[in-house]
Amino acid sequence: MSFTEDDISKIEGLYSKHGKEMFVIAFRILKDRESAEDIVQQSFLKVMDKLHNIDLSDENKTKKFLMIIARNLAIDVYNSRKNLSSNTEYVEAVDIDDPEFSNLIKSPCDELIAKENHTLIMKHINNLSPIYKDVVLLEMIYGYNRKEIAQLLNIKYDTIKKRSERAHKMLEEALRKEEELI
């Protein structure tokens, strides 16, 4: 595949404008700097395949496209790590004496409960229809507020607000039913 100087300029522009935000999305999912950087690179490899389909005049659509690619790749990596072994957990090396990380140290029991809760919540989020799933992921996992989600998805704020409220109710009901089974 060969690229013109215009294509290279387009890729560089997309990277400089959205690369950091894509990194943040991947990092929030994977909790690992190197893996998040790899996700950004993999995302741009995918973008290069679709470069001629990207319309830079629609800023929100372009941003949404890039963020979804990064999110999906990061989730794929997260899931593949989770499935590697139920006994092996991927952990980035951290100096536990560093005061910055001391508040992150938890007992094995706390970590197990947190991991089970996260897995359970993600299972129910993945069962939502796409219109609710995207809003919830952007809100809960990526930390966007409703106004930012509305801008990112190019949808009215009131629609995002209603979808978020409905999604949260659906998640609450699903988690309540799950709790009753236990």
Image (tube, rainbow, N blue to C red):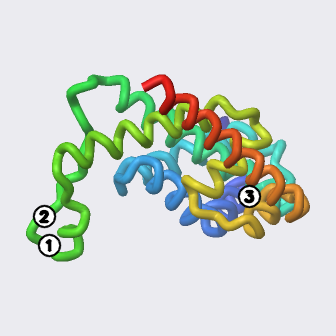
Q: Is residue 180 left or right of residue 55?
A: left
| Residue appearing at x 50%, y 42% in the figure | 74
Q: Residue type at mark 1: give it.
A: Asp
| Residue appearing at x 24%, y 51% in the figure | 92
Cα–Cα gap, marks 3 and 1: 36 Å
On the image, the x and y values in percent for residue 15 come to 61, 61
Q: Nearer the viewer, residue 6 or 108?
A: 108
Q: Quadrant of the N terminus?
A: top right
Q: Nearer the viewer, residue 64 or 47?
A: 64
Q: Nearer the viewer, residue 60 or 55?
A: 60
Q: In the displayed orientation, state which residue is furthest to the bottom.
A: 99
| Residue appearing at x 88%, y 56% in the figure | 159
Q: Nearer the viewer, residue 14 or 144?
A: 144
On the image, the x and y values in percent for residue 171 come to 63, 41
Q: Is residue 10 left or right of residue 12?
A: right
Q: Quadrant of the C terminus?
A: top left
Q: Residue type at mark 2: give it.
A: Asp
| Residue appearing at x 81%, y 55% in the figure | 153
Q: In the displayed orientation, state which residue is furthest to the left.
A: 97
Cα–Cα gap, marks 1 and 2: 6 Å
Q: Give the class, few, some or many, for how many residues have Cα within 10 Å of label 1's Cα (few <14, many ≥20).
A: few
Cα–Cα gap, marks 3 and 2: 36 Å
Q: Which residue is mark 2?
A: 95
Q: Are marks 1 and 2 in contact (CB under 8 Å)?
A: yes
For mark 1, give the secondary structure: loop
Q: Which residue is mark 3?
A: 63
Q: Which residue is mark 1?
A: 98
Which is more N-terminal, label 1 or label 3?
3
